[in-house]
Amino acid sequence: MKALVLIGGFGTRLRPVTYTLPKQLIPLAGKPMLYHVLDLLPSDVEEVVLATGYKSEMIDAFVRSHPLRWPTRTVPEAEPLLTGGGMKNAGSGMSDPFILLNSDVIARVDLTAVAAVQGRSGALGVMTLAEVEDTRPYGVAALGPDDRILRFVEKPEPSESPSRWINAGLSVWRRSILDRIPPGRPVSFEQEVLPGVLDEGVYGFKLSGYWDDAGTPERILRSQRLLFEDGRATRTGLPPGSLGRGPVAADEGVRARGASFGPYVTLAAGVSVGPGAHVENSIVMEGATVEDGAFVAGSVLGPRARVHAGHRLTGQVIGEAGEA
Ligand code: GDD
Ligand code: MG
């Protein structure tokens, strides 16, 4: 089986960090969001096709310098084609069936089991579904017997939400789904294609483990915490000479003598945290600086951002080279 990964979104809800970086390269628990979702792929996948658009060259460069376990190809879009258009654009040569992944979700799921359900039933598609309280930001499924999807509504008003089971963004499709997407223009798979193919047999696969979409400041930090709790962090341990409570995923070169850390922190390469400063529940990207005595919580600091001495920063996203 091959896998098609959608990576073309603008990451608008994570601005200003995403003005200079695609959200998929933001590190969570020590490694980019994209690599956490790819960790879910079975090891025997034949090829990974990355449907990129926004900041495609950065994804391409990163994947070249951090090669995946599978042969990998990037198919960029000149204009954003949305999810369905991206599938169509990148879909030639897809296997039958194929795995389709959104690149901004984190989960514990066995995709081999999802593929097996598709294989046994011969269904057009099997979509993993997560149960959430607030369905408004997601696509919601109404389920019939055997979890067949009877209706699908993208981003419904609460009063119109048919259930609490939402599209988790990890699915398996017969290749023929690609024939149902009009070529050469932006197409929302969820709004324009999916409702029209349900009568061909699309089933839900209910997730029992954790799931989240890391596309907003609040959810990216919640996602990071879930990954830490699931033991999926890389390079865990406090930087030399620092104090406090992990888990912290710190790059080797991080300087943080005399600083303290709360739980759930990523410190990327070249980060410096001054004496007396404290960082918790945050993502601190390459080359960022937290000066002496500053306090940072619930925040995302972009590459080379700076938090000034003694400053208190909570619940903020600071863009590349931004200051607070
Ligand atoms: N190639 C390409 N081109 N990819 C795109 C484009 C595009 O124009 N637009 C978005 N994507 C990618 C994003 O990078 C992301 O990985 C995925 O498609 C979904 O886009 P989002 O913008 O993150 O959508 P969403 O989170 O609002 O909703 C989607 O995901 C939810 C689960 O997280 C939908 O699929 C919902 O139905 C679903 O519940
Ligand atoms: Mg999303």
Image (cartoon, rainbow, N blue to C red):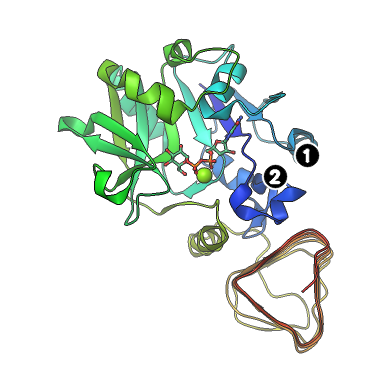
Q: Residue furthest left?
A: 145
- Give the left or right position of residue 179, taking residue 318 as reference: left
Residue occupying image coordinates x 72% and y 24%: 78
Q: Which residue is mark 2?
A: 22
Please give left or right for residue 259 compared with residue 299 in the image: right
Q: Could you give the CA–CA distance between mark 2 and mark 1, rounded to whole angstroms?
A: 8 Å
Under mark 2, the amino acid is Pro
In the depicted view, which residue is nearer to us: 14 or 63? 14
Q: Residue at x 75, y 41 (%)?
A: 66
Asked if one can make out residue 119 in the rendered structure from this viewpoint, the answer is no
- Residue 58 locus on image (x, y percent): 78, 39
| CB under 8 Å between discs 2 and 1 | yes
Q: Within 10 Å of the Cα at label 1, are there few (<14), some (14-19), or many (20+) other Cα atoms?
A: some
The answer to whether residue 19 of the structure is visible from this angle is: yes
Q: SS of the residue at dot 2?
A: loop
Residue 51 is situated, as x and y percent measured from the top left of the image, at: 63, 27
- State which quarter of the image contains the C terminus: bottom right
Q: Could you tell which of marks 2 and 1 lies nearer the N-terminus?
A: 2
Q: To which quarter of the image does residue 245 belong?
A: bottom right
The residue positioned 78% from the left and 78% from the top of the image is 240
Q: Residue at x 69, y 75 (%)?
A: 238
Q: Is residue 267 above or below residue 131?
A: below
Labelled disc at residue 58: 1
In the image, is the residue at mark 2 within 8 Å of ligand 1 by its beta carbon? yes
Task: Tell me the kind of residue under disc 1.
Answer: Met
Foreground residue, 120 or 140?
140
Q: Position of residue 163 (x, y in %)?
A: 24, 45
Which residue is at the front of the view, 99 or 238? 99
* Mark 1 close to ligand 1, CB under 8 Å: no
